[in-house]
Image (cartoon, rainbow, N blue to C red):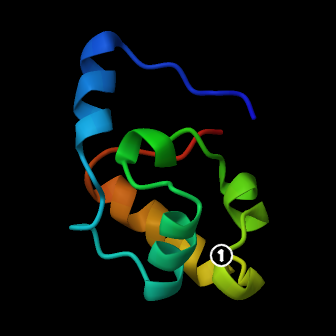
Amino acid sequence: MNKRSFTKEELLILKKNRFKKLDFTVRALQVLEFNKITTLGKLLQYSREELFEIRGLWRAKMNESSVKDIEAELAKINLYLRK
């Protein structure tokens, strides 16, 4: 996975900010948390395609609507997944 680069200031903010306050689907939250993706900084290092590859508890995968919800919630705060 190619990591997205951020400025030092952006990294400080992103590492501290958890995304639990964003309106992600239950499935999305469970899969992200199972994979220890608990901050915006970690989430933004993933591309859309990579999110479809990760699995959660009981091997559940992220579905299309979950990824769309994540993208929509991130867009509300002017953040986007890695291309």
Up/down of 63 relative to 83, above or below: below
Residue 67 at x, y percent in the picture: 58, 70
Say what secondary structure mark 1 lies in.
loop
Q: Amino acid at mark 1?
A: Gly
Up/down of 53 relative to 31, above or below: above
Please count the marks in the image.
Answer: 1
Q: Quadrant of residue 74?
A: bottom left
Residue 31 at x, y percent in the picture: 57, 73
Q: Is residue 5 left or right of residue 19?
A: right
Up/down of 83 relative to 77, above or below: above
Judged from this view, the residue extending furthest toward the top is 8
Quadrant, the N terminus:
top right
* Residue that appears at 72% across and 28% down: 2
* Residue that appears at 28% across and 53% down: 18
Quadrant, the C terminus:
top right
| Front-most of residues 61 and 23 | 61
Residue 44 at x, y percent in the picture: 49, 42
> To which residue does mark 1 refer?
56
* Residue that appears at 48% across and 42% down: 42
* Residue that appears at 24% across and 45% down: 17
Up/down of 36 relative to 64, above or below: above
**Crowdedness of circle 1 by 10 Å Cα count: few (<14), some, many (20+)?**
some
Q: Is residue 14 left or right of residue 46?
A: left
Residue 34 at x, y percent in the picture: 56, 68
